[in-house]
Amino acid sequence: MSFITQFTEATHQFLDRHSDPIKLSLTAIAASALTASSILTYQASQRRQRARTLKEELKEAELKKPIDLTPVGTALTHHIPPTFTENTIADQLSGVTEFFGKEGARKVRESFVIVVGAGGVGSWAALMLLRSGVKRIRVIDFDQVTLSSLNRHAVATLEDVGTPKVRCIKKHFKEIAPFVQVEDHIDLLNADNVDELLGGNPDFVVDAIDNINTKVDLMKYCYDRKLNVISSMGAGAKADPSRIQIADISETFAVRRKLKKLNILSGIKVAYSTEKPHHVKLLPLAEYPHFEPLAIKLREGLYARVHKEMITREYKTFKEK
C-alpha cells in the first residue's frame, strides 16, 4: 500500500471520528474568508473611485487658467456670469416688488435716471437705483478714485484708486446687476455739454454735485426744461441721519438765494439736513513736508477739463457784465 493511499484512509478515519467539530471549523473559516473577500472588494472599489475622481480633477485643473492677482494681492476669480432671464431678474428684484407692488416695480424697472456726481453721495444713490432694478442709469463725473475716497464711496476698492469714478462704478455694477444698462461719462458738466449729458429724456435727474455753482446751473437747466430733479444739499461734517429731510427748495437756505436771483423760488425737490455741522477742519498740507500726490492716471486730462470749465465760467461771467 502506497503512502498516499495510507494517508487518505487515515484522513477519512479522522474525519469520521471528528465530523461535527471539523464541520464547524470549516464553516467558520469559510465565513471569515467570505467577510475578508467582501472587505477587500469594497476597498478596491473605493480606491478605483478615488483614482477616477483625482484624474478628473487633474484634467479640470489643466484646463483652468493660472491664478491672477490684483495689484493688492487678492485673487482674480474667473467665473462664468449667470444667464439672466425675466424669471431670474424677477427673483433678484422680488423684495422691490413686495415693497412697491407689481405696478410700482414695473415703473421702477422701466425708468431712466441720470446721476450727476459719483462721489460719497452719487455713488450710493446710483447703487441703490441699481439694486432697485432701474433699467438704465447714466453716471456723470470727471474725477478719479483716491485713497481718501474709500471711506465714503459705495463700491470703490484699493484696486480702483487712480481710475475714473464712473468707470469704477460701471465695473462693479456689472457684478451686481448685469441686466441694468449703466452708462459712464467722464466729463465735467458745463454749458457746452449739458444738452448731451442730460439728453435722452430721463425720468429723473439726481444732483450729487459738490460744487455750488455747477449745482445751481444743473437745477436751473432741469427747472427750465421741466426735468424731474432731486438735489442733494451739503452734508459735510453732519452725522445725524434722523435730521435728513426731503422738501421743496423754498424750505431750505443753502442755494435758495442763488436760485432766487434766477427767478426760481420753488418747484425743485431737495434732500438736506437740519443738523448744524460739527467743527471739522481740513488738515493743511504744510504739516506734511514730504507729501507727494498719488500717481493718478489721466491726471493731465483732469487738469485740462478743470481748466476748460474755469475758462467757460469766467467768459460767461464777464460777458454778462
Image (cartoon, helix red, strand yellow):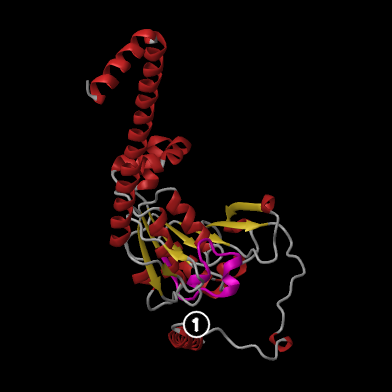
Residue with the most extreme right position: 279
Picture coordinates of residue 186, whole percent (x, y): 41, 74
Q: Quadrant of the N terminus?
A: top left
- The residue nearer to you, when weighing 202 against 122, is 122
Picture coordinates of residue 154, whole percent (x, y): 53, 61
Q: Say which quarter of the image contains residue 13.
A: top left
Tell me the kind of residue under disc 1. Answer: Ile
| 187 up-or-down from 153: above or below | below
Q: Is residue 224 visible?
A: no
Residue at the spot 48% in from the left edge and 53% down from the top edge: 128
Q: Secondary structure at mark 1?
A: loop
Residue with the most extreme front position: 1
The residue segment tinted magenta is 139-160
Picture coordinates of residue 274, whole percent (x, y): 70, 57
Q: Residues within 10 Å of mark 1 (few under 14, many from 20)?
A: some
Is 317 a magenta residue? no
- The residue nearer to you, when weighing 282 against 161, is 161
Q: Is residue 44 visible?
A: yes
Number of numbered tags placed on the structure image: 1
- The residue nearer to you, when weighing 170 against 52, is 52
Q: Say which quarter of the image contains residue 37.
A: top left
According to the picture, the residue beneath numbered tag 1 turns out to be 296
Left of 72 or right of it: where is 58?
left
| 173 up-or-down from 306: above or below | above
Picture coordinates of residue 18, whole percent (x, y): 39, 10
